[in-house]
Amino acid sequence: MSTNPGGQPKVGAPTRDGSPAGELEIISSEVPPASHVNDSLVIGLSIVAAVCGLVFGVTITLGGPLPLYGGALAIGLLALAYAVRRFFTDRYPEIEAIEPRLQFTDMGMTDEESGDLAEIHPVGRRSLVRRMLIAAAAVFGAGLLAPVSTLGPRVGNRLRQTAWAQGKRLVTTEGNPLRPDDLPPGGVSTVWPEGAIANEFASTLLLRLATEPEPPTNLDWVVDGSVLAYSKVCTHAGCPVALFRERDGALFCPCHQSTFDVVRGAQPTFGPAARALPQLPLGLDDEGYLVALGDYTDQIGPAYG
């Protein structure tokens, strides 16, 4: 390794013809001070990443809700990435170097030329922080293996079935059962099977139309001539069909603008959806409350298989 008169290392960059060229001169090498705050931040983020990895793995294995394991995955990835970034903030010394402005015929640097730069080594400290970061990455990585459990036997009809069944009352998010008169003409309400509130696959829109429904609506599943229910899960990408335009009897999906005609069997009239929203068979129980006559007969959500 060559040095300048002051004893500092320097890197030469000779041209192809062997003539002298510029030299990279390292004039200072400062080891950053240890930061307990930074170390604590890395340890804390590592713990968060490990916990999120466990939550993701356990939740997806047990079939938990998508927002929970999706949020855990996102937070865990962010925490782990930021922990790695903070770990290296004072890991290497701060090097200050100068290079004369010369003309080069070859800007490439050989292994011999880069020898001095290769001697810049990381600061040897914080073994605890390093071990915590490695452990967090290992735990989080193990959690990412959880989806392997979904590669088991065929699901059969499980994705075609919901919590709706014969005699299940339609209830609001607050758990209140509904009678037909609880909805005004043109009214709409999100309902669930009694005992399965917030089950995303069973979410249903109950409507009282201002006009009589027409085929291909199944009129046998309409109560009082105008009360009917459709799946709230869009048949295009599974988004919630949450908007209703009373003036033209249209359900609207805000994700990709699919539109469904509720007067005519929720057939798609605009957008990428190619199938109608499944209709829930409706009836009344002995007390006059709205109940399901069974589960959906058509597949809810996007088509598959």
Image (cartoon, rainbow, N blue to C red):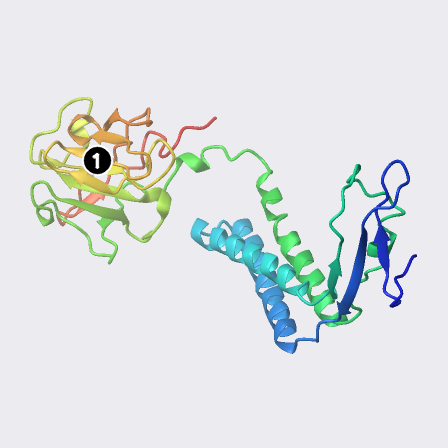
Residue lying furthest bottom = 36
Relative image position of residue 25 (x, y in whole percent): 80, 59
Above-or-below relation of 192 to 157: below
Q: Secondary structure at mark 1?
A: strand
Number of numbered callouts drawn? 1
Above-or-below relation of 145 to 223: below
Q: Which residue corresponds to the image point at 86% horizontal and 48% vertical from the top-left?
A: 113
Q: Quadrant of residue 202?
A: top left
Viewer-nearest residue: 9 or 79: 9
Q: Mark yes or no: residue 283 visible.
A: no
Relative image position of residue 20 (x, y in whole percent): 87, 46
Amino acid type, label 1: Leu
> Is 298 situated left or right of 152 in this image?
left
Relative image position of residue 45 (x, y in whole percent): 59, 66
Q: Quadrant of the N terminus?
A: bottom right
> Is 290 situated left or right of 102 in this image?
left
Relative image position of residue 300 (x, y in whole percent): 35, 34
Q: Quadrant of residue 230?
A: top left
Viewer-nearest residue: 16 or 44: 16
Count neighbours of disc 1 (C-alpha within 10 A) and say few if under 14, some if 14 to 19, many if 20 or more: many
> Is 28 situated left or right of 210 in this image?
right
Viewer-nearest residue: 215 or 21: 21
Location of mark 1 (residue) = 251
Q: Which residue corresponds to the image point at 19% horizontal and 42% vertical from the top-left?
A: 206
> Is 142 situated left or right of 16 in this image?
left
Q: Mark yes or no: residue 146 visible.
A: yes
